[in-house]
Amino acid sequence: MDCDRVVIVAGESASIPSYFDSAIGGVGASPISPLGSGHAKVKSNSPVTVDIVHLHRGYVSDCTRMFSAGALDSRWMERLDHMAEIQKAVVSSLSQGDDCSKAWEIGSFMAKEMGYSDNLMGMNPDKSHFLGHSVGLELDETPVIANGFNRPLCIGGTMAIEPKVIYPDGCIGTEDTFVRTEDGMECLTMGNSFPLFTDWN
C-alpha cells in the first residue's frame, strides 16, 4: 500500500477547523500547509488523532485511531466508546440497505441523545454535517452519510465511517473503511484487529 496522506492532530490543534469539509484540520506547519498539528509538543494525557489515507492499487482506504502519551481521563474514553457505538449503528443501518440519509438520522440522533449535538464532527460555526463518505479512486465520493442522500450504499460500494467529537482541548473518534456485500458490511481496514486507543507510554 502507498500512504497518500496522514493527518495527525494533538490536543488543542484538533479544534482548528479544516479548509475543506472535514471534522479535523489543525494548525499545520505553516499557512501554506494548514493541516495537522504543526510544531507544538504533544502534551501528556492528551488525545492524539491519527487519520491515515492509504492507496492500494489506486483505490483509497481511510482509517483513524487514537493515541496518547499517558492515560486519557474517563471523559475521553467514554466519548470514544460512544463514537464506536455510533459507528456500529451506522454500519448496521447500511447493512440492512437503509438510505444513507437514514443512517445519518440514526447516528446523529444517537449523538444528540448522548449529549454531543454541539461537538459531533466539529464545533459551531465550522461543523461538518456527515458521518461517513464513500471512497474509491478518490477520497471523497458519493453517497455520503448525510442529510439528503436518499439512496443506499450499493452492493460493492466502499465507505469510510468516521464519527468524531471535537472540543477546544482535543478530538476523539474512530474510522474504518467498509464494503457492502450481499451479506452486509465488511471491514476493509484494521477494524477490531487494532485497538481504537493506544497509550504509547
Image (cartoon, rainbow, N blue to C red):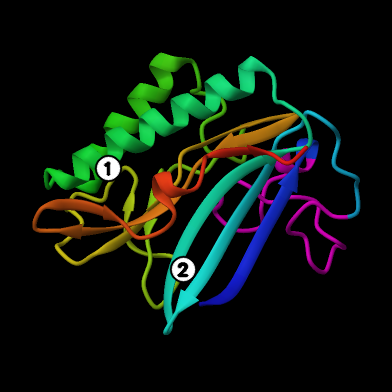
The residue that appears at 35% across and 23% down in the rendered structure is: 110
| CB contact under 8 Å: marks 1 and 2 | no
Q: Residues within 10 Å of mark 2 (few under 14, many from 20)?
A: some
100 to the left or right of 76: left
SS category of the residue bearing label 2: loop
Q: Is residue 180 magenta?
A: no
Relative to 47, does residue 143 appear above or below in the rendering? below
Front-lying residue, 7 or 201: 201
Number of numbered callouts drawn: 2
Q: Amino acid at mark 1?
A: Val
Q: Which residue is mark 1?
A: 91
Residue 71: name its quadrant.
top right
The percent coordinates of residue 87 (x first, y second) are 37, 37
Q: Which mark is residue 112?
A: none
Residue 88 visible in the shown view: yes
The residue that appears at 33% across and 58% down in the rendered structure is: 159
SS category of the residue bearing label 1: helix
Relative to 188, does residue 70 appear above or below in the rendering? above
The magenta segment is 13-38
The percent coordinates of residue 33 (x first, y second) are 79, 66
Magenta: predominant secondary structure element? loop
Relative to 58, does residue 95 appear above or below in the rendering? above
Residue 136: name its quadrant.
bottom left
Residue 122 visible in the shown view: no
The percent coordinates of residue 186 (x first, y second) are 25, 54
Q: Amino acid at mark 2?
A: Leu
Q: Which residue is mark 2?
A: 139
